[in-house]
Image (cartoon, coloured by chain):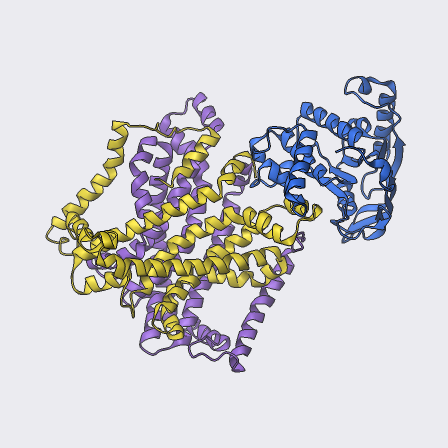
Amino acid sequence: MRLLRDPLSQNKTIVLGVAGTLGVLAMWELLIRSGAVSKPGLPVPTRVMAQAAELLGNTVFLNQVFTTIGEWLLGLGVAAIAGILVGGLMGAFPAVFVAFEYPVEAFRTLPSIAVGPILVLLLGAGVAPIAITVALSSIWPILLNTLYGVRGTDPTAVATARTLGVRPLGLLMQIRLVSALPFAFTGVRVAASIGLIVTVSAELLIGSGQGIGGYILLASTNAGNLDGVYAATIIAGVLGVLINAAFALLDRTAFNWKKGLAQ
Amino acid sequence: MSTLYKARGKEAAAGTVPRAPKKGFNGKRLLLRLLVPAILVGVWWALSASPSTGLFIANPLKAVLRIGQDFLSTDPSTFFLGKATYEHLLPSLGRAMAGLGLATAAGVAAGIALGSLPVAAALFQPLIHLGRSLPSPALLGVFFLLFGTGDAPKIFLIAFGVVWPILFNTIDGVNSIGHQRLQAATVFKIRPFDVLFHVILPGASPKIFAGLRTSLSLSLIIMIISELQKSKNGLGYLLVTTQRTFDYTNFWAILIVLGFLGVTLNFLFHIAERRVLAWHRGATQQHD
Amino acid sequence: MTSATSTEQAIELELQSVSKSYGKNLAVKSITASIPQGKVSVIVGPSGCGKSTLLRIISGLDFPTQGSVTFNGAPVRGVPEGLAMVFQDYSRSLFPWMRVDRNIGFPLRHISADERRQRVQEAIDAVGLKGKEKLYPWQMSGGMQQRAAIARALASHPKLLLMDEPYASVDAQTRADLEDLLLDIHATLGVTVLVVTHDIDESIYLADHVIALSAPPSVVAETVEVDLPRPRNQISTKQDPRFVELRAHVTSLLRSH
């Protein structure tokens, strides 16, 4: 087992990534075309790609993508506000931590998707139950990261602020929350990825045909349009990758000073 | 019981404010603990009694009693577990664990291979990122088509859905072992077998556990989704049928069971993690 | 664990015009040096002069672009037998998931359990870690962790002990203790020692001869024989006029290149 290998340069990584992806797709295509693998229902890369290209040129489908993004943003926004608020208070005040510790523990392991159907009954089908389902599943990383961030505030910074006469509320707002911000953002970043998967899943389960999930539902039941299912699923996945990359970039530019904390 | 203890550990290490309340009996603390759950139950009760929402929201007491009726029994020969536990809870749990187990085996093996071969990791990196972001429940129909209608499609869908965090974190974990430790292993001519089981696996284990934690929660979600169609049993199946028969007491009972299941699994996972990673808590307080 | 130097065949490490470049970047330029058996040799040079690169090449972890390394009469291809290494950063070279005794015994998994236990115990005694066997590395101070790393290297009964800036991460007092520990071990075991350091005082205090490297691309500025008597002492040796003289000489070597 050779252990020591030099890390690859960025250019090499990109070239290899493109080559690997194309290689896997080509191999897969070949296996199916040649008949080596012949199970009905398996995706054929070129056909799925063609279908995806067609979908991306279709304004109706694009509108559904925007609907999904809207639901996701709404859910993520609600989760971010609630998560930072509750997590921040739990981190700053022991009493709040004690009060919320067990409820948080119980609700964060509850599969949020199960609550969906009842939300539809209470709120009616549409954007609201999906956004709430998304919020219920994406609040936890935000809440926990904010909590750890507030707790991990450098005690020297707090002591310094105290000697400068900063009052408890100012201490929370100006020192603790600010230094917890990068952690909270990491939470939002993790939540964003989970949130998008839950958005599409919720559309499949409790949606009324809207969004990418709605399209997949239609494609898999009505017409048995498997290429459509695959293409839409992959488009949702690529959307997730792009969102994750955007958040990572934002993280690097906005919270560059965080690196100093790691020491 | 709390797995939020991590926060306490960090706080103790850094010696920062706020202080975790002292252990032992403390009336004020107990009141605080009960406050939020009491409010939640109160709101639930009020909503269940209201004419507009009471139709869909079952009385919490009735829901809890319903769990006792369906999921528990007085018969010692069935370990005091009721019919619904055997017909629905355990099959669901079994499929979730089978999927998670399959994903763990595949994810850790592939992750170690890719983590030790930077070229291979670079080749597959985009596909792994894509896999991680795929809404796998969308492929439920496809999995039914490919693997029939029994347990297989459900287990495979769970495995497919949860393998990504494990794979991703294992690769990350192998990369986090550190150049100098690997150099030490090379200079001291450690055998490949020992390197794998005594250097790479333990070195990557903190990250592997982080991935497993995400996958555990995810496996419960996909477990439910996989049972909503073409199923004859399972908690997800019950969620659908109780809604169809307007049996909302039972519906809420199942929600409570699901919450209980999540907390229990998380707790067991936590004990395992604490045992396996005992060294890691101390080591991270020092550096790295 | 007694010295068996006399019965072993004479070993010697030989560097012949060793060069190493990374792309266009020349790190080490044509280094020629020989390390006599049973002595303490120290390579000293300014930061970034390619000392660590050189040590990686000697240990077989890396390969020279040009030139060759001969250990014990045979060319080095891969990590040779009879070589052990102490790394600069103890916290990153010990395995934090193993207790001290397992860390030390881990490289000895090919020998019988009894012999392994005995060797581990000898190594632990030699570095003064008795009673700490069941601690995790991170439960000990930096100095003790580096002692454990030295014990791990000694347990394999090496012919050549390589040390890469072994005391760079510890405080001054611990550093002095560890320097004396090394001299002690060398006196009892007679193992050939090659230390790499940027500290001129340390190099002269430890060495039988000092190989002074210039700034990169590094060449050997001069090999300085250290004729200070042994056993050495942190206070009296460092006050010795000869020590002061040698220090001035080595300092000027590093400056002028």
The yellow-tinted chain is B
Taking C150 as reference, is A195 above or below it? below
Chain A color in figure = purple
Q: Residue at x 84, y 46 (%)?
A: C72
The blue-tinted chain is C
Taking A10 as reference, is A65 above or below it? below
Question: Residue A109, can we see it?
Answer: no
Single out the residue that lies furthest toward the front. C114
Single out the residue that lies furthest toward the bottom. A34
Q: Is residue A179 left or right of residue C59?
A: left
Q: Nearer the viewer, residue C220 or A207?
A: C220
Residue B183, percent across and down?
68, 46
* Image quarter in which the C terminus of chain B is found: top right
Residue C226, percent across and down?
87, 28
Residue B186, percent across and down?
69, 48
Q: Is residue C253 left or right of residue A103?
A: right
Question: Residue C196, can we see it?
Answer: yes
Residue A96, percent across and down?
31, 34
Q: Is residue A64 left or right of residue B27?
A: right
Q: Residue at x 19, y 57 (%)?
A: B250
Q: Nearer the viewer, residue A140 or B225?
A: B225
